[in-house]
Amino acid sequence: MTIYEIKVYLEQFFEEVELVGNGDNIIDGPAKIEDAGKGNVSFVANDKYARFIGSTNASLLIVGKKTPTPKYSDRLSFLKVKDPYTAFVFVLQRFAGPRVIAEPGIDPAAIIGQNVTLGKNVAVGAYAVIGDNCVIGDNTVIGPHAVLMAGVVAGRDCLLYPGVVCYDGAILGDRVTIHSGTVVGADGFGFAPQPDGSYVKIPQMGIVKIEDDVEIGANNTIDRATMGSTVIEKGVKIDNLVQIAHNCRIGENTVIASQAGISGSVKIGKSCMIGGQAGFAGHISLADKTQVAAKAGISKSTSESGQTLRGVPARPIREQLRQEAMLRNLESMKKKLDALEAEVRKISGQ
Amino acid sequence: MTIYEIKVYLEQFFEEVELVGNGDNIIDGPAKIEDAGKGNVSFVANDKYARFIGSTNASLLIVGKKTPTPKYSDRLSFLKVKDPYTAFVFVLQRFAGPRVIAEPGIDPAAIIGQNVTLGKNVAVGAYAVIGDNCVIGDNTVIGPHAVLMAGVVAGRDCLLYPGVVCYDGAILGDRVTIHSGTVVGADGFGFAPQPDGSYVKIPQMGIVKIEDDVEIGANNTIDRATMGSTVIEKGVKIDNLVQIAHNCRIGENTVIASQAGISGSVKIGKSCMIGGQAGFAGHISLADKTQVAAKAGISKSTSESGQTLRGVPARPIREQLRQEAMLRNLESMKKKLDALEAEVRKISGQ
Amino acid sequence: MTIYEIKVYLEQFFEEVELVGNGDNIIDGPAKIEDAGKGNVSFVANDKYARFIGSTNASLLIVGKKTPTPKYSDRLSFLKVKDPYTAFVFVLQRFAGPRVIAEPGIDPAAIIGQNVTLGKNVAVGAYAVIGDNCVIGDNTVIGPHAVLMAGVVAGRDCLLYPGVVCYDGAILGDRVTIHSGTVVGADGFGFAPQPDGSYVKIPQMGIVKIEDDVEIGANNTIDRATMGSTVIEKGVKIDNLVQIAHNCRIGENTVIASQAGISGSVKIGKSCMIGGQAGFAGHISLADKTQVAAKAGISKSTSESGQTLRGVPARPIREQLRQEAMLRNLESMKKKLDALEAEVRKISGQ
């Protein structure tokens, strides 16, 4: 692929793509700027990496419009765009090519239940099991060993990686990606305590609903609602090993990092960012655009959007950082107090 | 199902069920009180929800014996019982109907090893693998893709959801439910450090023993003992993504919330409640009826039953809450100290 | 097996093995010293357990060279070695015998892709799926239901337990063990934010590389690199439910306890010990031989090797323990401050 072809490709996404250098040079793959060699394309999206421009062996760098580019040499060319990071992501997509999860068509070793509706170009991998009454949209890929229990509905262009399990009645929108080992729709954790100390199981009769353009990582658990739906709204991205309990609603375009735990009936707003290992008490609401630091423990609802919360229990980050700083000074505070006490004793004794 | 039929059904579980309203009205399903419509049954178990009684569109509410019920109208009837929450749970069970995990009988695409004993009415799903010398009790359902390695023993009326893995020698009691992705009996984490920095694996020769009426959620890991057994006692309920290390014993009717981590050789007492993301140091014992707050770090054994522990390292909740309150006041303490220092300097200077 | 045979077996690993007692007595299995009975071998590696020597019913104890052994009786013999713990581990291995994960050969219900290279004595279990262009080394065992996507390379003597998933291109060294439910090579969590709040997926084009002698527990997630490799170096041991994000490098002989979370691009040094539920911020480096306490939150790089870190954010353990002690005394500090204030007021008032 020539640099000129990459320029034309990027012009689909950006109004202006300026070429500095030789458009005929061949690019055969992307690389990190510090590792790149001849034929590689890389990028500079922030000033921290600008220092590599002089020394990189890449043949092409995608940079910002204002990034100073050295005098033209045939060895290194530049494409200047408004958002070089996103431009590089599109270049990665161009070079990535599709990963084969399952060959098109139904593998002879897959089992398809009764009354299943399959769209066009559906791929179902070896040993996948699709239960009765499932509906699978066009171009959707069900990986080997995936299990859809009865009545699961998946939209178009979904990717279910090997070993995903969807319990009965789960609803997936279009372009939903779920990685291996994730369990969608297992029973919520609900038991009614009895006088003798034992528990009676509360039937979990609801479902999980996952909207369009959601990507869910590996080994997550997203429980079905007791009644109604656990909802993952449009555009949500979830990392690995995350717990989403029954009756939660995760707002549009929210991202959740690995090992976070969202307790039952929590409502998270839109465009939030939840850090790794963060936890939520049950039944609380988080306002839109909230950022939750890693390891934070959210214990009460918030209504102000755009806050950053940190600590256990979590508080606005400035308060929390001030408290952490004071904690580090606790020892000097103690010394000052002891010195003062001695001084006062001396005065009193006089 | 008529209201009268629900009354008769509940009389199996409660001595007294009082009907206020029209027993002939038809109920076709449960709903949350705020979402309920005509034909729905819902409940009021605590005063917080009593405010909905006037406005709900439900046709039937299950309420406490002392809950004031408005004057009779044909639109809304009441069943009054001692424990309306548990009564509603039983009604949910009545409406839930059984979920089909695997059809009765052995799926032709399941693999059954040598010398396997299967009880009456066992169901084994597609692509399940049951190893040599396993014993499966009456009515037990082994979901599609479940793997039982050699010598696993499961009792009656167990439910293993798709993709559960039980390593060799695991013993399950009666009425044990295990959700998808849970791994029972993988090797405990034991390695002997060597002088050159490498490790020699300590063979994990023990097993996992799960007693009657245990329910285990999705994607948990319960490791086999080094020698002897890791034991999950009768009636324990475990949420998702929980780690139970080798040689643990979890006491009867204890419940463990999501992402908690129980280190090796920990003994947890009976009827404890372990919060989400809580962690335990190895080799400690927790007294009966202990409540552990979410995210707590239990670092030493306790012997007094009924305590609530919180914090890292965890302490009795009152102490911990007092400390958290003082922490929030650290800034005013610092100001007071500085003011006092200035005052003392002034006095000394006199 | 006679005690004399155990002595000869241990002489493979230790220069000197001294027998005190009757070498002809028969040993039929290992046990914990407090549970041991006739025919059992157990061990004493630290003084805490020496008190059991007088009362144990074991027939053989493996002890240190300096451990005082009581006068000879035919009931109890001793083998004295330099490292009794490791010696006992070798004895455990001797008694454990091999666990059958899959019978030798290719199960007729396994699916092998095109252009796959299988070494000698490879075992592939029922319903395993091996993608195109995979290479599997001699004696490697691929358990039932394991899925290797295209182009996975595994070395000699590997053990993949039932249900392991390796995404395309993963590279495993020799003697790598991976337990059930672990997902190797799922996409790293990378998305480029767009002005409208949505995200564009960053293709994850790299791989995972696992070096020799690594053991990985159950239900872990080890993500592939964005570009290049996520690397687990030689001899690393990982417990259960651990997250290792894209582009991490875990140094030789490091051990990671359950539920720890390693964020993207973190480099952990050699011979580190990472406690349970510990978390790491992205893009940091940890020096060799660092010990990280359970639940710690590592927020910045370290360069000094051999430190122990604790707390959130983590600090050297002495500082952190001193701070925790001061925290417990905060209440008395407050009282002293209030008393001092009253005293100073009295003085000022004079």
Image (cartoon, coloured by chain):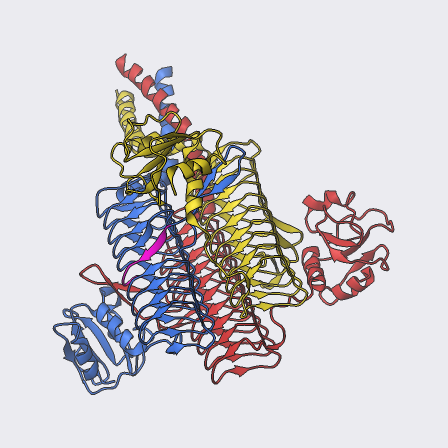
Chain colours: A yellow, B red, C blue
Q: Where's residue A75, x and y in %? A: 27, 35
Q: Nearer the viewer, residue A50 or C100?
A: A50
Q: Nearer the viewer, residue B131 or A156?
A: A156
Q: If the image is split into quadrants, where does the C terminus of chain A sit? A: top left
Whether C161 is drawn above or below B119: the answer is: above
Instruction: Report which quarter residue A139 is drawn in.
Output: bottom right
Whether C318 is drawn above or below A143: the answer is: above
Q: If the image is split into quadrants, where does the N terminus of chain A sit? A: top left
Q: Nearer the viewer, residue C2 or A270?
A: A270
Q: Nearer the viewer, residue C211 or A37?
A: A37
Visible residue check, residue C193: yes
- Residue closest to the far left: C15
Instruction: Report which quarter residue C88 is drawn in.
Output: bottom left
**Relative to C65, A287 lies left or right:** right
- Residue closest to the far bottom: C24
Residue B14 inside the magenta-drawn segment: no
Q: Where's residue B16, x and y in %? A: 76, 62
**Relative to A43, C316 lies left or right:** left
Q: Where's residue B58, x and y in %? A: 78, 50
Which span is picked out in magenta?
C206-214
Whether B254 is drawn above or below A7: the answer is: below
Q: Where's residue B303, x and y in %? A: 42, 58
**Relative to B2, B218 lies left or right:** left
